[in-house]
């Protein structure tokens, strides 16, 4: 894998122009801004989610490398402009030639601050902060949400599966059930970042340097006169890398036939790598298979399990004493089976005043406080113990001075408050782009994967548990909360009773 492939996960596969990976209304709003002369007014947007997925206590940030590559190559090609010119409203072209000429010359010039991939993140915390010309910042919404929502979702699912599997090996085997080629590729990358040890997806292996693994299908066994002949042939082809799928006909008989072939392999100086169980009662069958293998003198032959696994089933199987040491996870990982979308949002939080005298902060109001946005140019500060264990996160307006004594306020329940006594902290939003230029190389996928493992391990077990996890404290700095509440009162219509 070349460094150019590592740093170009999108443009290395697709056409260089991906500017139309967006919704129509992003272009209609952009035209409206341009027509009103607002295209260059400085704006700030935040990308965040309102609750962690899967009923869990956290999420794992992923997708920044894709997003950075997309931003770095944001251009409207002639084919894009020709298509946009063909769109029509009721009585005229939707976009006039003058606006299309503006798009032809458009170059990305925003500042972007982001959480590094692999960072553990919680509800309402910006994964990205975009600051720059209003038209540009608006135009980014759909693509950024597409890229970060999906990979953050899959990385989080993989982290939960990794938690359930413990020290066992975990491989992502989901390409055939993924939502298309792109869904499969992004899922393989995010699953590896979140904690999987490898993938069956060869394109992901080639493009991202992820270890690839695989066995054989039932069709291999069915292509031979009998099961033992199929195993013999596979061992002949891969004498040092053979894993036999043993449940085509009768699982335990398949294990016995695998042992027969394994004995002949050993006589030739080779060892059977493992057997795979893909159906039936995995707890019972794995215990029986382990007993047969041990009795025959193959205690180190691995038992691989597949078949619609996820973190909950893995946990249950372990509680039942299953003798499985390698897990192949497919459908329920790459499709985030029990929650198919993260639900991230992209909200305007500040606009530069027309007289350039400072910022005008904006808020989107909802009947539910949980859906009311947070104004300001937000930064996320994580307070930690001396050993690096997270204690609380504070969202604050980086454009305003902080008071000496800090208190955080729950953004959903303002009666819940917590004074900050810790002095050790780190700022989570880090510079990625300045004036449209990458300011530093992004971490490699391996580095981001290692970061995710460190960050998850630092969380208290009560936050990591699957059922009713402890809610990690995330709050607004008190003066920001006060400003937000006042702004809500200012903007909300007062209706007489």
Image (cartoon, rainbow, N blue to C red):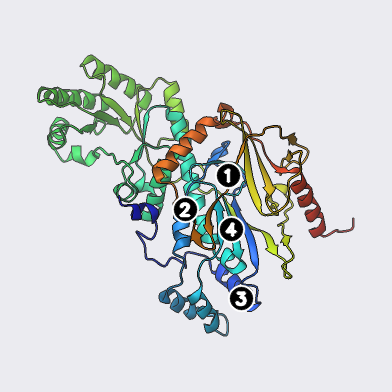
> Label 4 belongs to which residue?
130
Q: Earlier in the sequence, mark 2 or mark 1?
A: 1
| Residue at x 61% of width, y 29% of height | 385
User: Residue 182 at x, y = what percent?
Assistant: 39, 55
Marks 3, 4: nearer the viewer: 4
Judged from the image, the secondary structure of the residue bearing numbered disc 4 is strand
Q: Nearer the viewer, residue 111 or 15?
A: 111
Q: Earlier in the sequence, mark 1 or mark 3?
A: 3
Q: Earlier in the sequence, mark 1 or mark 4?
A: 4
**Image side of residue 199 versus residue 255, left or right:** right
Q: Is residue 107 visible?
A: yes
- Residue 316 position by quadrant: top left
> Label 3 belongs to which residue?
34
User: Residue 72 at x, y = what percent?
Assistant: 46, 62
**Image side of residue 360 versus residue 41, left or right:** right
Q: Earlier in the sequence, mark 4 or mark 2?
A: 4
Q: Nearer the viewer, residue 246 or 57?
A: 57
- Residue 492 position by quadrant: bottom right
- CA gap, disc 1 to disc 3? 34 Å
> Label 2 belongs to which residue?
440
| Residue at x 39% of width, y 42% of height | 446
Residue 448's disc number: none
Label 3 with label 4: CB-CB less than 8 Å: no
Marks 2, 3: nearer the viewer: 2
Q: Residue furthest left?
A: 268
Label 1 with label 4: CB-CB less than 8 Å: no
Label 1 with label 3: CB-CB less than 8 Å: no
Q: Quadrant of the C terminus?
A: bottom right
> Label 1 belongs to which residue?
428
């Amino acid at each position: 894998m070349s460094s150019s492939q590592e740093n170009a996960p999108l443009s290395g596969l697709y056409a260089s122009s991906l500017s139309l990976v967006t919704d129509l209304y992003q272009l209609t709003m952009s035209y409206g801004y341009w027509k009103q002369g607002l295209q260059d007014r400085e704006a700030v947007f935040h990308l965040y989610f309102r609750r962690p997925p899967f009923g869990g206590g956290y999420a794992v940030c992923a997708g920044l490398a894709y997003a950075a590559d997309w931003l770095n190559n944001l251009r409207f090609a002639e084919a894009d402009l020709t298509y946009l010119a063909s769109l029509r409203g009721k009585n005229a072209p939707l976009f006039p030639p003058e606006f299309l000429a503006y798009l032809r010359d458009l170059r990305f010039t925003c500042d972007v601050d982001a959480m590094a991939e692999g960072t553990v993140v919680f509800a309402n915390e910006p994964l990205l902060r975009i600051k720059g010309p209003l038209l540009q910042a608006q135009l980014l919404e759909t693509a950024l949400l597409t890229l970060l929502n999906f990979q953050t979702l899959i990385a989080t699912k993989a982290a939960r599966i990794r938690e359930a599997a413990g020290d066992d090996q975990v491989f992502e085997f989901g390409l055939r059930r993924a939502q298309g080629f792109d869904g499969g590729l992004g899922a393989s990358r995010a699953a590896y970042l979140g904690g999987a040890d490898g993938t069956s997806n060869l394109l992901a292996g080639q493009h991202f340097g992820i270890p690839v693994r695989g066995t054989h299908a039932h069709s291999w066994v069915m292509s031979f006169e009998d099961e033992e002949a199929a195993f013999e042939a596979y061992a002949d082809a891969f004498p040092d890398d053979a894993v036999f799928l043993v449940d085509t006909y009768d699982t335990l008989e398949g294990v016995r036939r695998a042992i027969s072939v394994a004995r002949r392999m050993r006589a030739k100086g080779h060892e059977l790598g493992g057997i795979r169980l893909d159906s039936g009662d995995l707890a019972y069958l794995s215990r029986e298979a382990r007993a047969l293998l041990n009795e025959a003198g193959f205690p180190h032959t691995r038992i691989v399990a597949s078949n619609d696994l996820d973190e909950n089933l893995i946990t249950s199987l372990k509680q039942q004493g299953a003798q499985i040491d390698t897990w192949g996870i497919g459908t329920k990982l790459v499709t985030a089976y029990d929650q198919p979308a993260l639900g991230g949002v992209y909200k305007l939080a500040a606009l530069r005043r027309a007289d350039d005298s400072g910022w005008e902060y904006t808020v989107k109001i909802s009947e539910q406080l949980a859906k009311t946005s947070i104004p300001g140019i937000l930064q996320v500060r994580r307070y930690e113990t001396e050993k690096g264990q997270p204690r609380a996160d504070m969202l604050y307006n980086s454009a305003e001075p902080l008071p000496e004594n800090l208190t955080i306020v729950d953004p959903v329940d303002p009666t819940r408050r917590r004074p900050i006594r810790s002095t050790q902290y780190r700022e989570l939003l880090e510079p990625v782009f300045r004036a449209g230029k990458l300011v530093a190389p992004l971490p490699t996928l391996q580095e981001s994967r290692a970061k995710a493992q460190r960050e998850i391990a630092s969380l208290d077990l009560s936050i990591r548990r699957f059922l009713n996890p402890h809610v990690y404290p995330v709050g607004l700095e008190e003066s920001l909360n006060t400003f937000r509440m006042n702004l809500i009162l200012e903007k909300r219509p007062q209706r007489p009773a």
